[in-house]
Amino acid sequence: MTAFTMERVDSYRSAEELCPVARAMELQSFRDYLGSGSEKRVLELGSGNGTLTRCLREIGWTVDTVDIAFQAPPEARRHHAADIADGLGFLPKDAAYDAVVSLAVLHHVAACPRRLPDNLANDLAAVTRPGGILMLQDVPTPRVLPSLDANPDDGYFAAANTARIFAELVDPHSEPTHNGIYIEMAAIGAQLADEFAHLARFHHRCDWNFPNEEIAARYVQALFHLNLSLAEVAAVIGPTLQPAEPGLRLPWALDCLVMQRL
């Protein structure tokens, strides 16, 4: 599992303060599949500094959060400071959620790209109500993606760019370094198939938007706590920065799995 340090936590927060709207499109697929959460409860695995928590609250969900390093987001009803790698045994025995979600979290807790820890997989089923939604998003797996020669406007290009940035920047230069695990969502779906029905798996294009190239480089440097100069970061992300209104966009995509509890 990737370790966290307070320096890493502070760096993450500074990125969000630097450009709070950069990741806005990452949340759209959650809105699409979860819809209005009036009188419904969701468990968010890995709340970070509350980017997804705020989104869930905005669409009406009552949110319980889990995170190993961060304090409770203000929007959470209940927060658990816990490591989900060993399962969800810290939850109340009667816990039952209408949805369980995670955003770029599972690579921190999995030892194998094709399998979640057994305790966690079992507990995901135990805490999701029948008919409830399980929605998992993470960094795309490099080995199942086409090259960057694909059409720059399609989702596969954005997914390949995400994987490239992790391979060239995050894996070798983040502090602490990325653990090198890339979740294979198709395999995770098969692992959970006894308890969940498949609804969708797709690469969700969610480009990051910045006012200029300097802010883009500073954001990426801070978000991943990179031990690199801004010039070195810009050299990697610069070739795929694209014009946007206003500013620039960095092609980005996440691998998304949506399942429904049987």
Image: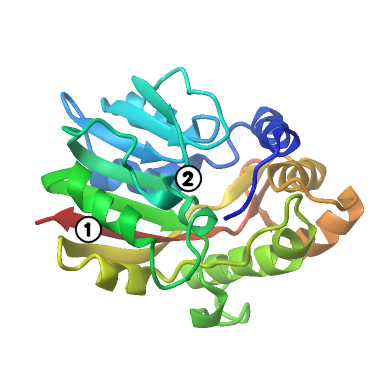
Dot 1 lies on which element? strand
Tag 2: amino acid: Met
Number of numbered tags placed on the structure image: 2
Q: Nearer the viewer, residue 202 or 238?
A: 202
Establish if 104 lies above or below 114: above
The span from disc 2 to disc 1 (Cα, nearest Å) is 21 Å
Residue 181, quarter of the rendered image: bottom right
Q: Which residue, given by chain and number where applicable, does mark 1 sit on?
A: 259
As shown in the figure, which amino acid type bears the numbered disc 1? Answer: Met
The location of residue 49, given as percent across then percent down, is 55, 30
Residue 246 screen position, x and y as percent: 65, 40
The mark closer to the camera, 2 or 1, is 1
Crowd tier of the residue under label 1, counting other residues whose Cα lies within 10 Å: few below 14, some 14–19, many 20 or above = many
Q: Quadrant of the N terminus?
A: bottom right
Q: Residue drawn 41% across and 30% down?
A: 53
Residue at 31%, 66% in the rendered image: 201
Residue 212 visible in the picture:
no
Q: Earlier in the sequence, mark 2 or mark 1?
A: 2
